[in-house]
């Protein structure tokens, strides 16, 4: 095993909550009469809740106060959390679970590095509530990706140096955060196209090969 710890992004890597984010933002956008589609939703990947709303508001031509923004983002989160209740351990693929178990058996500590403030709730829904050695998420950071903070905190939580950590990400902002934190990174999904990663994964289980010493 080349790494002492592997830090996983959550949404888009361990599980897929895009459709729930989409439905919840769509409800808010419709209420405000703002055009919103799946292409715009893709731009919200790995981006914090308020920054996501700012992207949606690019198509809104009236000013909005910070208080109103808080009201709408809170409403979005309530709808989103209601939708997350649909998730269950069946939403965790066998490939992801077997790969995680294989990496742990090979000696790596496993951590989460997610922008989401709902990370712990999502992990519980997936049956992974007690699985990871550490969770760094939207609740313990002040700067979101591409700032390295979420991954630096994750490495500190597991007590390993950045050079001994590998980050797994599906968003370009997440790869930039890993690189900024001095960590190697593996890209999956859309993040592959950026060409920024140390490794490009075709499928999640490729992690077992690329981390082999
Ligand atoms: P929340 P990740 C990110 O999670 C999502 O990709 C992004 O779409 C979302 O806006 C962000 O979490 C904040 O989520 O509203 O639940 O706090 O990819 O960093 O695991
Ligand atoms: Mg992600």
Image (cartoon, grey):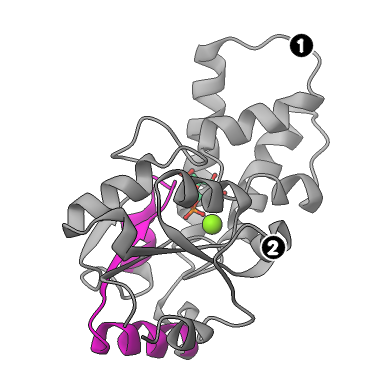
Residue span colored magenta = 95-124
Which residue is located at x 33 percent, y 59 percent?
Answer: 163
Q: For residue 190, which numbered disc appears in the image?
A: 2
Of residue 139 and residue 62, the one placed in the foreground of this image is 139
Residue 39: image location, x then y, percent: 80, 50
Quadrant of the image containing the C terminus? bottom left
Report helix, strand or loop for mark 2. Answer: helix
Q: Is residue 209 above or below residue 152?
A: below
- Does residue 142 show up magenta in the picture? no
- For label 1, the residue is 62
* Label 1, residues with CA under 10 Å away: few <14, some 14-19, many ≥20: few
Residue 177: x and y in percent read 48, 46
Q: Secondary structure at mark 1?
A: loop
Q: Is residue 203 above or below residue 20?
A: below
Is residue 70 something one can see in this rendering?
A: yes
Q: Nearer the viewer, residue 197 or 76?
A: 197
Please name the residue shown 59% across and 57% down the image: 20
In the image, what residue occupies the spot 43% across and 48% down? Answer: 116
Q: Residue furthest left?
A: 159
Q: Are marks 1 and 2 in contact (CB under 8 Å)?
A: no
Dot 2 crowding, Cα within 10 Å, few <14, some 14–19, many 20+: some
The magenta stretch spans residue 99 = yes
Residue 120, quarter of the rendered image: bottom left
Quadrant of the rendered structure where residue 55 is? top right
What residue is shown at x 56% (from left), y 21% (from top)?
A: 69
Is 80 above or below relative to 12? above
Left-right relation of 66 to 183: right
Q: Quadrant of ligand 2?
A: bottom right
Q: Position of residue 188 (x, y in %)?
A: 60, 70
**Which is more toward the observer, 183 or 167?**
183
**Alpha carbons under labels 1 and 2: distance apart:** 33 Å
Instruction: Judge left or right: residue 187 versus residue 192.
Output: left
């Amino acid at each position: 095993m080349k790494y002492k710890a592997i830090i996983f992004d959550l949404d888009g890597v361990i599980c897929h909550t895009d459709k729930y984010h989409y439905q919840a933002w769509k409800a808010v956008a419709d209420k405000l009469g703002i055009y919103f589609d799946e292409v715009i939703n893709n731009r919200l990947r790995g981006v914090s809740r308020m920054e996501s709303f700012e992207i949606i508001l690019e198509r809104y031509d009236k000013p909005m106060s910070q208080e109103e923004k808080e009201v709408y983002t809170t409403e979005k989160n309530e709808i989103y959390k209601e939708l997350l209740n649909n998730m269950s351990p069946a939403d965790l693929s066998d490939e992801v679970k077997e790969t995680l178990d294989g990496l742990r058996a090979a000696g790596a500590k496993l951590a989460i590095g997610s922008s989401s403030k709902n990370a712990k709730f999502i992990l519980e829904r997936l049956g992974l509530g007690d699985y990871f050695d550490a969770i760094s998420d939207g609740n313990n950071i002040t700067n979101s990706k591409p700032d390295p903070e979420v991954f630096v905190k994750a490495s500190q939580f597991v007590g390993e140096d950045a050079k001994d950590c590998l980050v797994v990400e599906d968003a370009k902002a997440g790869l930039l955060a890993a690189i900024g934190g001095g960590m190697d990174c593996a890209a999956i999904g859309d993040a592959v196209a950026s060409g920024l990663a140390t490794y490009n994964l075709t499928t999640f289980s490729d992690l077992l090969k690329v981390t082999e010493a």
